[in-house]
């Protein structure tokens, strides 16, 4: 297996040994540990290249609580086998799994958590793994609906700013091409958008010259919201006209560069889990979070007002992540009827 780093935290007064950090120290081998005092071993499985991993070596903040920490790099394909190798050591009491999208690993993770019921599992991801639960499982992930609400809010801030700067007489037209995205995600987006911009002009990205016209002609818009999957013709139109692009799921189209997309967990989420392991404050359960890194804004494309709005909004959403539900319920009945008829949002 590929080991990124292996760090030993010994009892207070003893030396701390780490590969590549303190020369002359032997690295701890989890499989060969025979401690005189009970040590708690932890494994950090890094699947792929999650963009929230800290750039500095993981460390423990409690020097008098002996912990052995080993970080192992793996892939989706080899995850189950690698995890099995690590967890075969009975001294491993905590397993942290860091992965961009935990969804594809849901079955493997469930299998591991059931087989190793005495191990605490911390699943850290930008997108959660549905169906993974248990008394020995904690899952930390970006609150997807809060992210969608925030993107809608920021699109509204952008539209209002454009009206002000360009002295427009009406709100800019925003195309909408979202397929395969949950109803709640779309409700959250529209709740954010219409709360900030009640006069928002959102139009479906469907051919104005008929569904079977060749070539199809799409509405002229200043921006497009995409998510899930889009048709090839819509993608080509977006790429050719290069409007401002707001992507609810990330990577939906190849061009142009998106102005706003979902972001990632803060690196502090990883170090916090290690700290909880050391202090004995671990808790099971789902833990959706709102981090300041949870929305990615391209500052070269978006005005400072959008960046500033996110700095403020992220703090309030961290305290009240279900705001989108009450805000959607407050939308005028006419708006909700429009969203149902135009976009199938029920």
Image (spheres, rainbow, N blue to C red):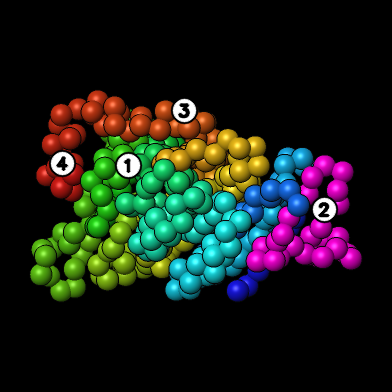
Q: Is residue 13 above or below residue 56?
A: above
Q: Decide whether residue 188 is among the magenta residues.
A: no
User: Gap between marks 2 and 1, in whole Å?
Assistant: 49 Å
State the image coordinates of residue 46 (x, y, percent, origin top left): 56, 62
Q: In this view, does 157 lie above or below 271?
A: above
Q: Determine the residue positioned at 42% across, 66% down.
A: 255
Badge 2, how many Cα within 10 Å: few under 14, some, many 20+? some
Q: Can residue 241 be seen in the rendering of this structure?
A: no
Q: Determine the residue positioned at 86% across, 48% down.
A: 14
Residue 329, quarter of picture: top left
Q: Which of 69 and 55 is in front in this view?
A: 69
Q: Is residue 205 above or below residue 189?
A: below
User: Gap between marks 2 and 4, in whole Å?
Assistant: 58 Å
Instruction: Say which element carries label 3.
Output: helix
Whichever of labels 4 and 1 marks the residue nearer the N terminus, that label is 1
Q: In this view, does 206 lie above or below 135?
A: below
State the image coordinates of residue 41 (x, y, percent, origin top left): 64, 54
Q: From the image, tell me which residue sits under label 3.
A: 319
Disc number placed over residue 189 in the picture, else none: 1
Q: Main secondary structure of the magenta part?
A: loop
Disc number placed over residue 346 in the picture, else none: 4
User: Count of labels shown?
Assistant: 4
- Position of 296 compared to 239: left or right? right
Badge 4, how many Cα within 10 Å: few under 14, some, many 20+? few
Whichever of labels 3 and 4 marks the residue nearer the N terminus, that label is 3
User: Gap between marks 2 and 3, in whole Å?
Assistant: 38 Å
- Position of 13 compared to 337: left or right? right
Magenta stretch: give its range: 9-35
Residue 276, quarter of picture: top right
Q: Nearer the viewer, mark 2 or mark 1?
A: 2
Instruction: Say which element carries label 4.
Output: loop
């Amino acid at each position: 297996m590929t080991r990124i780093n292996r760090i030993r935290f010994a009892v207070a007064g003893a030396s701390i040994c780490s590969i590549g950090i303190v020369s002359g120290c032997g690295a701890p081998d989890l499989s060969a540990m025979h401690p005189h005092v009970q040590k708690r071993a932890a494994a950090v499985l890094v699947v792929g290249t999650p963009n929230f991993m800290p750039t500095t070596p993981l460390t423990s903040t409690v020097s008098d609580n002996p912990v052995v920490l080993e970080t192992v790099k793996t892939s989706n394909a080899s995850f189950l086998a690698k995890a099995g190798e690590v967890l075969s050591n009975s001294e491993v009491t905590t397993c942290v799994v860091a992965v961009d999208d935990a969804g594809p690993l849901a079955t493997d993770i469930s299998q591991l958590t059931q087989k190793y019921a005495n191990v605490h599992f911390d699943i850290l991801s930008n997108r959660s793994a549905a169906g993974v639960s248990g008394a020995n499982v904690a899952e930390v992930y970006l609150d997807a609906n809060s992210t969608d609400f925030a993107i809608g809010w920021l699109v509204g801030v952008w539209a209002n700013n454009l009206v002000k700067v360009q002295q427009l007489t009406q709100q800019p037209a925003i195309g909408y091409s979202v397929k395969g995205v949950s109803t709640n995600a779309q409700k959250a987006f529209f709740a954010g958008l219409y709360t900030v911009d009640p006069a928002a002009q959102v139009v479906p990205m469907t051919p104005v010259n008929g569904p079977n016209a060749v070539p199809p002609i799409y509405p002229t818009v200043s921006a497009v919201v995409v998510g899930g999957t889009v048709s090839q013709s819509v993608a080509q139109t977006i790429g050719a006209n290069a409007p401002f692009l707001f992507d609810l799921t990330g990577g939906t189209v190849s061009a142009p560069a998106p102005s706003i997309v979902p972001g990632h967990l803060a690196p502090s989420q990883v170090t916090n889990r290690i700290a909880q392991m050391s202090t004995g404050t671990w808790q099971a359960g789902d833990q959706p979070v709102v981090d300041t890194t949870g929305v990615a804004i391209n500052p070269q494309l978006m005005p400072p007002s959008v960046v500033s709005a996110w700095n403020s909004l992220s703090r309030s959403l961290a305290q009240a992540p279900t705001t989108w539900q009450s805000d959607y319920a407050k939308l005028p009945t006419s708006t909700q009827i429009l969203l149902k008829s135009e976009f199938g949002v029920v």
